Amino acid sequence: MKASITDAGAPDAEASREPLPPLELFDSPRAWRMVAAAFVAMFATYGVAYSFGAFFKPMAAEFGAERSATSAVFSITVLVWCVLGPFTGHLADRLGPRIVVATGAIGMGLGLALTSMIDRLWLGYLTYGLGVGVGVACAYVPMVAVVGGWFIRRRNTALGIAVAGIGFGTVFGAPIAAALIARLGWRATYALFAIAATVVLLGCAWVVERPPVHVTPSRVRLADALRSPAFGFLYASSVAVSIVLFVPFVYLPSFARDHGASEFASAALVGIIGGASVAGRMGLGNLADRAGAVRLYQASFLVLALSYGIWLEASSYPMMVAFALVMGVGYGGYVALSPAVIAHLFGTNRMGTVLGALYTSGGIGAMVGPPVVGLIIDRTGSYRVAIACAFAVALVSFALLIPLRRFEPAATTSSAAID
């Protein structure tokens, strides 16, 4: 009796494989330990990154900076983690995830510590942008690829749970930051975040292990994947959605403050987005095992787009909460299902590298969205025009996914077969 493992896409003919391990390793308690490590790593990195909205006003006030200039700190951070994604994914595929995640721990801790000492805003572009950007890049793509490689039957469920760490980090990161800033100031808060993030990520690096089957991807097949029409639609849609995706994390707290909400309640809106995204990540990740990743991925984009219509009409705090809830579900589905869609369309053999390539799109969107929205707000004195533009771009991101089902594999092989 011979065991074999297949993916939605055919294995690379030129890939060099290690001997196939026992199938009992997959979906095992050891595999779920990798899910736990990925969850914690994403909780820490994104909890820090997505708390930036709580720091936005105090930093802008101290440096006397416009919204567009202050938001650029966050945009550069997203650009760094998106651009580095293909490299960290490739390094994790080649060298194993442990050294990559440990490097991210040191980079994030150092960046946050230096940010707490800056005396000019532009220095934050370097300290925060590079430090936090490196930390997220070294945690997200490598850890997602690890989880994908440890599972066969429950891969989508495992990926959904792992990336739910982003949602939980968002739930707690911004409110904790707001409370600490009110008591200690933004500089001391970043110093505390530096210590916590370093310790947590080093612990995750110690736990994480390379997947049972290590595959060295074929360069030719990877290039084919990146040039395929399916990847083109995925990439274009991801650029469009990323233009609007990061806008609420930067501006929703200040929008709420301008409409009379307290500082803590304003920061809590980012936490609500994170909480709602947990439902999207875990629920849709589990559902994708049965209903299909591509269809649910498209639905997530539609929900996310329609949420901006709610924000456009929001003038009360309950309406802002409604926006945060709906946007969070769509956002959570987008994040949870991206790895599942990549695995479904292209297989897991080169998942870390292809997924990293897809996530470079986020850097493009992040460099456009928050600074342009800040510029519109600074020039018009109103959020409404900027939100209306975000609504239109989000609808475009959904429309770009409509042709995607034409490129699904004609017949999806089972993830594990025994001959």
Image (tube, rainbow, N blue to C red):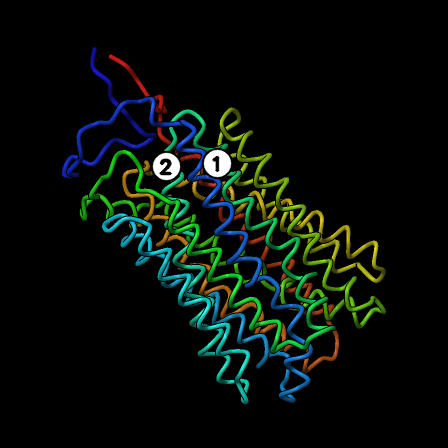
Q: Could you tell me residue 287's position as x and y percent?
A: 55, 29
Q: 175 and 12: which one is in front?
A: 175
Which one is earlier in the sequence, the residue at label 2 or at label 1? 1
Instruction: Report crowding for label 2: few under 14, some 14 to 19, many 20 or more residues within 10 A (C-alpha).
Output: many
Q: Amino acid at mark 2?
A: Leu
Residue found at x 33% / y 27%: 25
Residue 215 location, quadrant: top left
Q: Amino acid at mark 1?
A: Val
Q: Is residue 259 left or right of residue 30?
A: right
Disc 2 secondary structure class: helix
Q: Is residue 1 above or below residue 187?
A: above
The circle on residue 419 is none
Q: Could you tell me residue 39's position as x and y percent?
A: 51, 45
Q: Could you tell me residue 66's position as x and y percent?
A: 64, 84
Residue 147 location, quadrant: top left
Q: 119 and 281: which one is in front?
A: 119
The circle on residue 345 is 2
Q: Is residue 215 left or right of residue 160?
A: left
Q: Are marks 2 and 1 in contact (CB under 8 Å)?
A: yes
Q: 226 and 359: which one is in front?
A: 359
Residue found at x 46% / y 39%: 35
